[in-house]
Image (spheres, coloured by chain):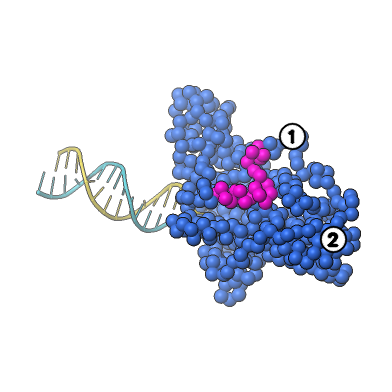
Chain colours: A blue, B yellow, C cyan
Amino acid sequence: MTTLVWFRQDLRIADNPALAHAAARGPVVPVYILDDSGDGGRPFGGASRWWLHHSLSALSNSLGGLVLLKGDPARLLPDLAGHTGARSVVWNHCYEPSAIARDTRLKAGLSSAGLTVTSFNASLLNEPWTVTTQDGGPFKVFTPFWRACRRLPVEPPSPAPATRLARLPKGLGARLADWHLLPTKPNWAKGFEPEWRPGESGARDRLDAFLQGGLGGYAELRDRPDRKNVSRLSPHLHFGEISPRQVFAALSLHMAADSRATRDGEKFLSELGWREFSYHLLYHFPTLPERNWRPAFDAYPWSGDRHHLATWQRGLTGYPIVDAGMRELWATGYMHNRVRMVVASFLVKHLLIPWQEGEAWFWDTLVDADLANNAASWQWVAGSGADAAPYFRIFNPVTQGTKFDAEGRYVRRWVGELSRLPDAVIHAPWEAPAAQLEAAGVRLGETYPAPIVDHKAARERALGGYEVVKSAGNALR
DNA sequence: TGAAATGTTGGGGCG
DNA sequence: ACGCCCCAACATTTC
């Protein structure tokens, strides 16, 4: 029996339950649909399109073929079933509110057209609706959520199935190049290429490299942007080139083999836990990407200065750690997690720009842009989210720099114009003596910006804004 | 998965 | 020897 396997955010062969289900029953028609029909979902950001291109290419190569279609799945899937003689369709779950709505409609529509539809979990350790508090509701705090998850069994990953492709009519589907997912003029993704290898084997290699070289000391060193102690699996996980179950299984093996790895391993698993928590929140609170999770934050007196936003986006705020992060993002499609928190806090609290603006920029520029993680994390920083950083927690960009990039190696890499400044002032060039600036070839306001806001004043301004939120919260109560 | 302000303690210099 | 002050180091509280 021929089965359509509709690939979405599961661009892998191993531990792919939909594919395994189909392959066990007969020939497979693998299909990916680029849906620009505007079904309520967000269009891909630029960096995501770059990744998607390479990931689809890798998947197509390892499957030996992949039908590429563009348009509305509700029309395309029945058509494709007709052309290929397939009687059933399988896919793995997506969790974006628009995707859930679409898939629900599709399931009904395809079924009434006589097709069998089966769907699976491939992207989470636990389905969001299976993790509940005592009273059956969703969790709103990470620690008890993750404790509950850790008590649940995790399915072992399944090996790659022996897949036999169905004979496909000639000329079926589009050519990947014709989708123009890659940037051309200008090719702003040049800097992405040495950093990433999208696709299933790149994901596996990244995990192995992390287990060998990055996990030791992870609990502390994960905060150091100048070091290679984070996994960088996020884009691979987002596109489903590797599953959390596979990561979980590999970590469990690693920890079983070496008890000294327990602390670092558990810390790393808890980061997977934050991913699960984000999906849990998005599932139970579908307005998370748009609306403040805590309505009291609707009262926050934002300023929304467009010029400040552009300055932040371009990495010209005058705070080296912030600018380094924003430039790393632009150059590579990625930013170290610690620095993400610093730049996000800076946008929201120092510049008083709504978190949605930062979320939108990350959506466009991150190769790991992910609706659940992005929305939940921005709300976490802003203080408006579930189990969020308290509103008065305002990162000092100088302190964060000296603490986590003590030798300034991260800043020097991304903010070249400061590279000759001594360590002592690399995170606060405006405090350097004139002679030191001169010797390093730095002229503040010319070769590198002076800080666009004063930290102390900005901090007090932000705290003042939160007073309004507090009284709004009291009014709501 | 902060930072800054405020409070406490204890050693050393000094009259 | 003693009390006093200073201040760094650390702890606690507040934002």
Q: Please, what is the dominant secondary structure of the magenta stretch?
A: helix
Tell me which chain the residue with mark 1 is part of. Answer: A
The residue drawn where x is 69% and y is 58% is: A160
- Please provide percent x and percent y for residue A97: 72, 62
- Please provide percent x and percent y for residue A90: 77, 64
Structural crowding at the residue carrying mark 2, measured as other residues with C-alpha within 10 Å and reported as few (<14), some (14–19) or many (≥20)? many
Q: Are marks 2 and 1 on the same chain?
A: yes
Label 2, label 1: how many angstroms apart (C-alpha)? 35 Å
Kind of residue at badge 2: Leu
Helix, strand or loop at mark 1? loop
Is residue A284 depicted above or below A179 in this figure? below
Q: Are marks 2 and 1 in contact (CB under 8 Å)?
A: no
- Viewer-nearest of discs 2 and 1: 2
Picture disc at residue A77: 2
| Residue A227: in magenta span | no
The N terminus of chain A: image quadrant = bottom right
Which of pointers 2 and 1 lies earlier in the amino acid sequence?
2
The residue drawn where x is 66% and y is 40% is: A192
Residue A96 visible somewhere in the drawing: no
Is residue A412 depicted above or below A22 in this figure? above
Closer-to-camera residue (A332/C7) = A332
Q: How many marks?
A: 2
Picture disc at residue A109: none
- Please provide percent x and percent y for residue A341: 55, 49
Residue A7 visible somewhere in the drawing: yes
Structural crowding at the residue carrying mark 1, measured as other residues with C-alpha within 10 Å and reported as few (<14), some (14–19) or many (≥20)? few
Picture disc at residue A186: 1
Tell me which chain the residue with mark 2 is part of. Answer: A
Horizontal relation, residue A188 to residue A31: left or right: left
> Over which residues does the magenta segment extend?
A191-210
Closer-to-camera residue (A176/A37) = A176
